[in-house]
Image (cartoon, grey):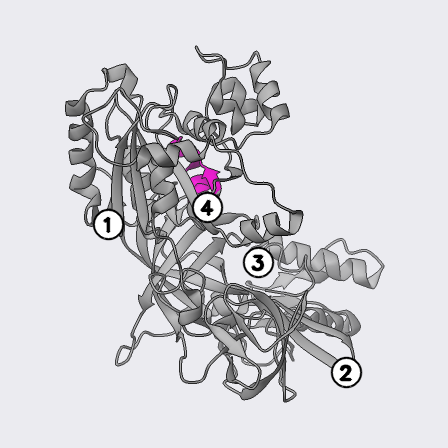
Amino acid sequence: MAAVESQELDQQPEALTIEEFLEQESSKELLRFSTAGSVDDGKSTLIGRLLYDARGIYEDQLSSIQNSKVNRSSGPIDFSLLTDGLRAEREQGITIDVAYRYFATPRRKFIIADTPGHEQYTRNMATGASTAQLAIVLVDARHGVLPQTRRHAAISALLGIPHLVLAVNKMDLKDYSQQVFDKIVSDFLAFAADFGFSSIQAIPMSALEGENVARLGTAMPWYEGPYLLEYLETVPVTQDLGSKPLRFPVQYVIRPDQYFRGYAGQLASGRVSVGDEIEILPSGRKSRIASISTFDGLLDTAEAPLSVVLTLEDERDVSRGDMLVHPKALPQIARQVKAHLVWMTDAPLSAGRNLLLKQTTRQVTVRVQAIESKLDIQQMSQQPGEQLALNDIGIVRLDVSQALYFDPYKDNRLTGAFILIDPLTNGTVGAGMILEAVVTKGKFEPLTASERYARNGHQPAILVVREEDLARRLERRLFDHSCQAIVMDPGAATDALLAAGLLLIVSESADPRALRLDELDLPADIDGALDRILSHLEQRGVLLSDRFNSGDGI
């Protein structure tokens, strides 16, 4: 069977019209897969060899790498140059960024994410693998299973990738030894067998020589399993998103004129039909679907993962970040969740940190309530930990300012995933997978100042502004950006109002905590003066930095 399939690559395609060709291509299944492993395991070379042997390379690409003088291999073609396109990658001989490549065979279409192996770029690996249906984890036959191999397998499992290929590469450098291969497979399964993969397929290969990549090799007659391309063409990958409950996160409200109000987005799961009753979260109000529009026209029924524009029979207040669901199949709704988290930045994460959380099309403030444990890569067990360092994987408990509506990640990869954003730099610092809601029934925790800060987006403060017009304008500017601010008389109950987390704007104060804004060097222009005040409050740590840059608040 393998020999017959290998010959398919050499067969000339039948003459087809362009319409027939497009229909044939559109009917093929699509498999998204990623590659991962330690540095210099041969990931880019493997993908380059696969593309070359499967005829997935354009002639100009082939000519370019044949003429390249950088990072030459011992053979006529350096296959790694097909995916390592950055100058730094070619100079250092490592993969830094994720490289995506597309190719097709008579059976399937493929999108490859060639991800970095270096520990420094683990966050890029997590990004590339986040949409994959299969992961190829490479192991250098000379070195065996390494800590980074364990980390990549663990991340692949956390990301919900169902199928994993253990590609034992560079077997030519170990004389194609079966004993070496069996030892590596045994070591890998010892820690990965309980990760929950639907299947783990081990394949011995030599990417440089093309053994067991796109054809069945002859150097390892003791191996009786599939070669890599054969497995990629036959592994079951069907994801019936349409059978799951309806989840439609609203991405954009389309209002071209007074007669049309549509809600655009991608169906994360489920199907929806004209006339279906839906519930709008978080309001809980109900309506019915009036129409389903796509680029190609109107539909009676749409199914995930199609992008559509929905209209409702009734006028309802729906905005970006809301979710449309069927009333009898609601997602979980909670303000506290437990999640796996991959930490992606140099500064460590500690409990009490305030960040932004983006889940589906929503962005809300979040406080890290606790770090329950972190994964020990060597022992592959959860251990107590107070911080998550760069590339650490842990279980955290999060307290969100507004309730999330979600499904556990294992049930729905789109509604169960989120990223954490640093509000100071606007950089992504973590990627998470929701495990479950945290049940707090019967448990009471006193309200803390940090919780008020997470909700309000600012610290309490006394702001002294003598000029009444400037004070009133400052109150309006702060209020427009969701701050809790009030102009008050000097004799009011200051301590009580500060305890409530408010910004108090007064004309005079003897309180040593007061920030005397009237003593700042303010421009004569009123708007310039307000901008200077807000900048000063950010520098003093009263306001979240960059809170006012977008004009929309948090």
Q: Residues within 10 Å of mark 4 (few under 14, many from 20)?
A: some
Three-letter residue code for mark 3: Leu
Mark pair 1, 2: CA separation: 52 Å
Q: Is residue 329 above or below residue 417?
A: below
- Magenta span contains residue 124: yes
Q: Is residue 21 above or below residue 402?
A: above
Q: Which residues are magenta?
A: 111-127
Instruction: Tell me which label, 4 or 1, sits earlier in the chain.
Output: 4
Query: Picture coordinates of residue 81 (x, y %)?
Result: 52, 23
- Magenta span contains residue 427: no
Instruction: Tell me which label, 1 or 2, sits earlier in the chain.
Output: 1
Q: Quadrant of the N terminus?
A: top left
Residue 195: image tag: 1
Residue at image mark 4: 108
Instruction: Tell me which label, 3 or 2, sits earlier in the chain.
Output: 2
Query: Picture coordinates of residue 466 (x, y %)?
Result: 73, 69
Three-letter residue code for mark 4: Arg
Query: In which quarter of the view is residue 302 placed?
Result: bottom right
